[in-house]
Image: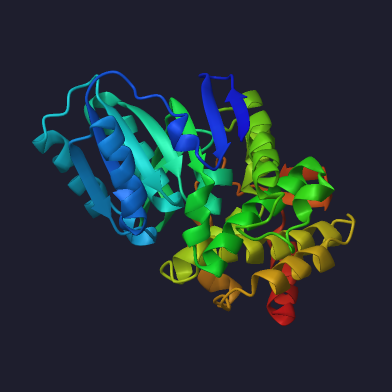
């Protein structure tokens, strides 16, 4: 079992391994459980052990991150009369984690919550760092808040129930963390399976990168922007596809675009490394609209500063820059990106 501790801006533990639910401590006060229907048996076992009477199961996926579902969960909590000293337990993948955290951030102006991530994506990304949110039709994650859990408990037995692609796509975020930190071990994903002996330590290593970055810059004023590597184009592709393109696949395609930008700026040629990741992932094909058709989604990107869209560009593993780029360069890289697919 791997144990990490987040210290800033609010301390909380992260436990990763098999059997971690037995290590989790029940919070004082009333509890409510929001969970992904795919992990109902695990959720019910936790609810029975902790005596949780209020339980709501939802279908995961981007369909859960909507204003309608958000309102439904708020009304459910209100209907149960949950008071301000209640704790929301959130169990599921990345979308349920994002939704549940945002519900906790906003119901009664803020509840405590515990995160129980059950996918690789949720373990290495969504459950850590305090970003919560939902989507709008105009773009991904345009509504949200920073709200930090009081604990994260990643039960790795849940990963053994995932479809192979779902397991793999979460590791795209871990590969991204390897690029950010210059950690070659994190960029070695090809041998990883739910039964891999090194999986537990690998996931903890990936999470540690995000913990280090978010502790230094919890509200994304500077260094935390590096974690958006691959996400600017990736989110635009997701939104253009109406979320038919899975998040991990979108980020992988976004990493390829970022690698092409890095090469164009004179950095190390990382295109082959990312294409190797895509070959291993075998994602569904992305939309490849004309550049002009993506612009509306890019211009609504939440990472804009003033009128400038900031791009995270890898010049080498461990050496990234964040800056606006001329549209001519972006369009040239996009043409190359389309040609390589």
**Is any part of residue 303 visible from this angle?**
no
Q: Is residue 114 left or right of residue 44?
A: right
For residue 271, which quarter of the picture? bottom right
Front residue (pair 55, 121): 55
Q: Position of residue 183 (x, y in %)?
A: 81, 44
Image quadrant containing the C terminus:
bottom right
Q: State whether residue 335 is above or below residue 91.
A: below
Front residue (pair 311, 210): 210
Residue drawn at x 50%, y 46% as measured from the top left: 302
Residue drawn at x 59%, y 45% as measured from the top left: 124
Q: Position of residue 300 (x, y in %)?
A: 47, 53
Front residue (pair 272, 189): 189
Front residue (pair 203, 317): 203
Q: State whether residue 246 is above or below residue 286.
A: above
For residue 47, which quarter of the picture? top left
**Is any part of residue 107 visible from this angle?**
yes
Q: Position of residue 24 (x, y in %)?
A: 44, 29
Q: State whether residue 144 is above or below residue 37.
A: above
Q: Is residue 332 left or right of residue 215?
A: right
Q: Is residue 336 left or right of residue 153?
A: right
């Amino acid at each position: 079992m791997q144990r990490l501790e987040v210290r800033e801006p609010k301390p909380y533990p992260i436990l990763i391994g098999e059997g971690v639910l037995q290590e989790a401590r029940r919070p004082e006060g009333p509890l409510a459980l929001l969970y992904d229907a795919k992990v109902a048996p695990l959720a019910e076992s936790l609810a029975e052990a902790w005596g949780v009477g209020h339980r709501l199961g939802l279908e995961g996926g981007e369909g859960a991150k909507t204003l309608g579902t958000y309102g439904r969960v708020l009304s459910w909590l209100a209907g149960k009369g949950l008071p301000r000293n209640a704790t929301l337990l959130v169990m599921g993948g990345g979308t349920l984690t994002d939704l549940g955290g945002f519900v906790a951030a906003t119901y009664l102006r803020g509840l405590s919550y515990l995160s129980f991530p059950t996918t690789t994506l949720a373990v290495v990304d969504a459950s850590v760092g305090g970003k919560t949110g939902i989507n709008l039709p105009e773009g991904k994650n345009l509504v949200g808040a920073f709200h930090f859990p009081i604990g994260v408990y990643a039960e790795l037995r849940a990963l053994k129930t995932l479809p192979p692609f779902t397991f793999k796509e979460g590791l795209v975020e871990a590969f991204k963390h390897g690029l950010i930190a210059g950690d070659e071990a994190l960029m070695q994903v090809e041998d990883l399976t739910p039964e891999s002996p090194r999986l537990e330590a690998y996931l903890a290593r990936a999470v540690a990168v995000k913990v280090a970055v978010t502790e230094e810059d919890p509200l994304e004023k500077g260094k935390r922007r590096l974690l958006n590597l691959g996400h600017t184009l990736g989110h635009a592709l997701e939104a253009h596809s109406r979320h038919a393109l899975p998040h991990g696949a979108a980020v992988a395609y976004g990493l390829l675009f970022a690698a092409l930008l890095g090469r164009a700026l004179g950095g190390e040629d990382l295109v082959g490394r990312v294409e190797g990741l895509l070959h291993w992932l075998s994602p569904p094909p992305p939309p490849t609209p004309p550049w002009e058709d993506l612009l509306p989604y890019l211009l609504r990107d939440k990472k804009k500063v003033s009128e400038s869209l900031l791009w995270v560009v890898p010049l080498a593993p461990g050496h990234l820059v964040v800056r606006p780029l001329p549209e001519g360069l972006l369009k040239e890289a996009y043409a190359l990106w389309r040609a390589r697919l």
